[in-house]
Amino acid sequence: MKVPSPIVLATANRAKAQELAEVLGSAGLTCWGEPVELRTRPEGVAEVPETAPDFLGNARLKAEALVAATGMASLADDSGLEVDHLDGAPGVRSARFAGEEATDAENLAKLLEALAGLPDGHPGRRARFRCAVVLVSASGQSLAARGTVEGRIAAVPAGDGGFGYDPVFVPDEGDGRTFAEMTPAEKHAMSHRGRALKALAEQLASS
Ligand code: IMP
C-alpha cells in the first residue's frame, strides 16, 4: 500500500495522539519524500463506540468509521492494560474501568485498590499493555499490527510523564522505573504502541 497522506487519527485522546505522532515520526514514515501529515479527528465526527470484544476489532471499527465519515485514510489504535490478578481486566475497558466518564486518576485509583492486598512482587501484579493499530486507505485497503509490553503494577505511583496507568506500570525490559518516569523516547522504544506502529510502518514499507 502506498503511504497515504494526510491520515486522520481516530483518537480523541490528546496524549495518545501525541504519542502516535511521535512514534510514527521516528519510524520515518514518508509520502513522496515528505513526512506524512497527521490530522486529528475533525470536530463534528463523533467518537466511534468501542463495541468489539478485542483491541484489533475496536481499532478496525474506528478506522473504518473514520474513513466513511471523512473520505480520508485513517489510523486507529485500541489499547489497554491486562492484569493477571484481575483475569485480564481492565482490558478493552481500560479507559472506562472506574466508570463511563472516568478520569485517568480515577481508573488508576481503582486499579491500586483492587491490588491493595497483594505485596510488591506478587505474581498477581503481573500485567501487560496491548495495542492494535489499523490503517485503512481511502479506497478501503487495510493493514493491521499489534504490540505488547510485559511488566508489573507497582504498589505506589511514580512519575508524572505519559498518561493513563503509566505511573504504576514497570516494564520488565526497563531499569525499574515506571513508564511515567521515562522520557517519551524511552517509553516508545519498548511500549505496546511503539511496537505496533513500528510493525505497521515495516508492513507499509514492504507492501
Ligand atoms: P483506548 O485505546 O482509547 O480505548 O483507551 C486505552 C486506555 O488504556 C487508556 O485510556 C489508558 O487508560 C490505557 N492505556 C493505553 N495505553 C496506555 C499507555 O501507553 N499508558 C498508560 N495507559 C494506557
Image (cartoon, helix red, strand yellow):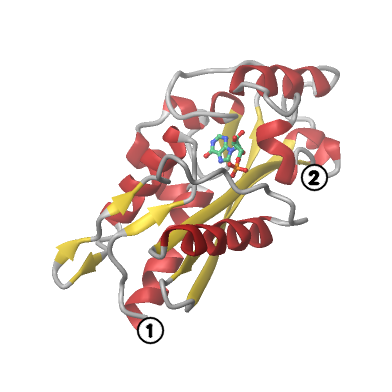
Q: Nearer the viewer, residue 110 or 99?
A: 99
Residue 53 at x, y = what percent? 78, 56
Q: Secondary structure at mark 1?
A: loop
Whether 54 is drawn above or below 202: the answer is: above
- The answer to whether the residue bearing label 1 lies less than 8 angstroms from the nearest atom of ligand 1 is no
> Taking 110 as reference, is 196 left or right?
left
Give the residue at mark 1: 207
On screen, residue 110 versus residue 40, left or right, reads right
183 and 202: which is toward the camera? 202
Which residue sits at x=40%, y=45%? 42
**Where on the image, by quarter, is ligand 1?**
top right
Q: Residue at x 79, y 40 (%)?
A: 89
> In the rendered image, which residue does mark 2 sit on?
88
Q: Residue at x 44, y 67 (%)?
A: 200
How many marks are shown on the rendered structure?
Answer: 2
Q: Is residue 113 above or below residue 99?
A: above
Relative image position of residue 12 (x, y in whole percent): 49, 38
Q: Residue furthest front?
A: 44
The mark lying in front, picked from 1 and 2, is 1
Secondary element at image label 2: loop
Amino acid type of the residue that numbered disc 1 sits on in the rendered structure:
Ser
Residue 50 at x, y = what percent? Answer: 68, 49
**Pointer 1 or 2: first along the chain:** 2
